[in-house]
């Protein structure tokens, strides 16, 4: 009898334990990855981290250059190294956008800012090959796999608009592929698309639907490399599948989407998007989607989630005020309806000068209404932004607070988080924005470490809470300034309360209707905990901000 009682008791404990585990499993919710709320880290591959000095010099690129206009050694291995070190994890980064990796022109050129090589990646010579200065296909495959293992998506930079400049080593592409005039004057749609951006930067004839042969220079190159037959075979299959004419834009679309099929990259940033007919981008997205579906089918165990392929565009001058449209003098174009999930927001750097509530409420209103279902990529500095929000790096803390707490997708330009200098003596033009990453400061400078810690705390909070970037903003109180964000996606919901410009030491902030009385909350910035009472939470910390989340 005692044995039976014991068995029944053990069974009861077992059932109770399983029920508890089932309940815990049921209420455990994995934070979804949401592109509209992503933390994107934008880096120049050559300027980020040099993990392999043996690939620093190729194609006899040995001529003296203007300051910061030659290759400096950063490579794919360097990115992988920082992924494995957890640098991006600690910063809350969940997507990396890197400059183009395709093979660049071999020689350099001087367009008035000093002799320059194509360290930046925007001067393509061969879209089908990686530039050895950046690394190898095996290294790229490893980098993408490591990124995915850390929950980090990979965004490539796609250039369709132009080839690299003409040099003694790099011939002009055939006339039926590119134009070299007229120069763009931006007075209307035609003079922004059917023109050349910069002297000696041959412009792809993206309006053409005419069949063209492969450039002789590519045919010769591929034959020397022993891959001509394979490349032609793949092109034949592509054109047979799609039914496209063999026009220049479709060749390039094929070559760029191959990186999706082969490596499983998650997105593309489109370079100089407004200088190409918008229909080209719609076709590009169509083929990206096909390639992404193909990769997922071929690599089922490596698929991260059900998110579709991501595309964002550099439509220079676009801002939220335009809503769904970018307006030329004679035409309005909806790039969101032509293949893009997102557009880069060129006004954030100026709108960040507003106070917090004006900035946050405006962005939330636009993104939750007119732009609902789409996104914008906010930034304070970039590789070619001549007027960044904090050009002298005097407001690195404020920069982080405004960028990382603003509705929308955040683009952290490499070195924003470490106040890497954007004013380099002896440089000309945009070279001043492109110095090597200041790893020594991060290692040795207490001031840099303090700045980085602030970016890390806000970045992790943002990563853990899609409500920050994609949620509805609501002011709770003006003084002290407190707001909430609320996000719902299917059965998932996320709520946070944030207080800024608070008193240091003990502070009590209203939580509105976000957290119920009795709820246990945690300040993700200080680590301090509290219990909500009478619609308020008290936190005693040495900081002037509070990032409240439900305690897990």
Image (tube, rainbow, N blue to C red):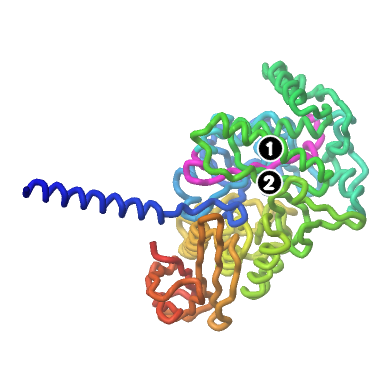
**247 within the magenta span:** no
**Kind of element beneath mark 1:** helix
Q: Which residue is mark 2?
A: 311
Residue visible at 75% across and 43% down in the picture? 115
Left or right: 293 in relation to 179? left
Residue visible at 70% across and 64% down in the picture? 369
State how far apart marks 1 and 2 are (Cα).
9 Å
Residue visible at 87% across and 46% down in the picture? 193
Q: How many marks on residues?
A: 2
Regarding residue 441, the answer to whether it shows in the image is: no
Predominant secondary structure, magenta span = loop
First in residue order: circle 1 vs circle 2: 1
Hey, which quadrant is residue 490 in on the image? bottom right
Q: Which residue is mark 1?
A: 288
Q: Which residues are magenta?
A: 146-170
In-front residue for pair 211/127: 211
Q: Which quarter of the image is occupied by the C terminus?
A: bottom left
In-front residue for pair 40/452: 40
In-front residue for pair 267/514: 514
Left or right: 106 in relation to 52? right
- Residue 212, label in figure: none
366 up-or-down from 483: above or below = above
212 up-or-down from 509: above or below = above
Return the x and y of residue 314 as percentages of the image width and height: 74, 51
**Kind of element beneath mark 2:** strand
Return the x and y of residue 292 as percentages of the image width and height: 63, 36
Residue visible at 89% across and 38% down in the picture? 180
């Amino acid at each position: 009898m005692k044995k039976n009682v014991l068995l029944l008791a053990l069974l009861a404990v077992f059932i109770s334990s399983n029920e508890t585990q089932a309940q815990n499993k049921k209420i455990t919710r994995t934070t979804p990855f949401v592109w509209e709320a992503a933390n994107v880290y934008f880096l120049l591959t050559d300027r980020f981290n040099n993990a392999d000095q043996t690939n620093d010099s190729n194609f006899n690129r040995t001529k003296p250059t203007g300051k910061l206009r030659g290759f400096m050694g950063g490579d794919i291995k360097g990115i992988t190294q920082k992924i494995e070190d957890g640098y991006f994890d600690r910063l809350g980064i969940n997507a990396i956008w890197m400059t183009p990796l395709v093979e660049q022109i071999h020689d350099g050129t001087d367009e008035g800012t000093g002799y320059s090589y194509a360290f930046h990646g925007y001067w393509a010579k061969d879209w089908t090959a990686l530039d050895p200065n950046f690394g190898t296909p095996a290294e790229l495959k490893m980098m993408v796999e490591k990124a995915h293992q850390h929950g980090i998506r990979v965004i490539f930079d796609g250039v369709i608009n132009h080839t690299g400049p003409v040099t003694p080593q790099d011939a002009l592409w055939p006339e039926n592929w590119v134009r070299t005039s007229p120069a763009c004057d931006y007075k209307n749609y035609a003079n922004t698309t059917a023109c050349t951006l910069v002297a000696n930067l041959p412009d792809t004839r993206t309006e053409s639907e005419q069949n063209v042969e492969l450039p002789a220079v590519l045919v010769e190159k591929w034959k020397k490399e022993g891959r001509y037959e394979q490349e032609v075979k793949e092109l034949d299959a592509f054109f047979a599948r799609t039914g496209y004419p063999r026009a220049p834009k479709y060749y390039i679309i094929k070559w760029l989407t191959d990186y999706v099929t082969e490596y499983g990259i998650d997105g593309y940033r489109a370079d100089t998007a407004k200088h190409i007919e918008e229909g080209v981008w719609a076709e590009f997205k169509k083929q990206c989607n096909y390639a992404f579906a193909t990769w997922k089918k071929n690599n089922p165990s490596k698929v991260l989630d059900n998110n579709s392929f991501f595309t964002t565009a550099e439509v220079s001058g676009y801002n939220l005020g335009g809503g769904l449209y970018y307006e030329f003098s004679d035409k309005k174009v909806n790039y969101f309806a032509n293949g893009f999930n997102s557009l880069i927001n060129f006004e954030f750097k100026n709108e960040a000068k507003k106070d917090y509530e004006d900035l946050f409420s405006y962005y939330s209103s636009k993104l939750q209404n007119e732009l609902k279902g789409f996104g914008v990529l906010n930034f304070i500095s970039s590789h070619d932004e001549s007027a960044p929000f904090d050009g002298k790096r005097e407001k690195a803390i404020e920069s982080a607070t405004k960028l990382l707490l603003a509705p929308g997708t955040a683009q952290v330009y490499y070195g924003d988080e470490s106040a890497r200098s954007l004013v380099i003596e002896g440089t000309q033009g945009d070279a001043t924005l492109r110095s090597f990453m200041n790893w020594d400061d991060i290692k040795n400078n207490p001031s840099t470490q303090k700045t980085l810690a602030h970016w890390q705390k806000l970045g992790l909070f943002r990563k853990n809470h899609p409500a920050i970037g994609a949620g509805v903003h609501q002011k709770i109180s003006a003084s002290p300034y407190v707001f909430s964000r609320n996000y719902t996606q299917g059965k998932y919901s996320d709520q946070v309360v944030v207080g800024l410009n608070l008193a240091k030491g003990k502070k009590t902030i209203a939580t509105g209707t976000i957290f119920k009385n009795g709820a246990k909350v945690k300040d993700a910035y200080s680590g301090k905990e509290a219990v909500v009472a009478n619609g308020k939470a008290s936190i005693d910390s040495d900081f002037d901000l509070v990032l409240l989340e439900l305690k897990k």
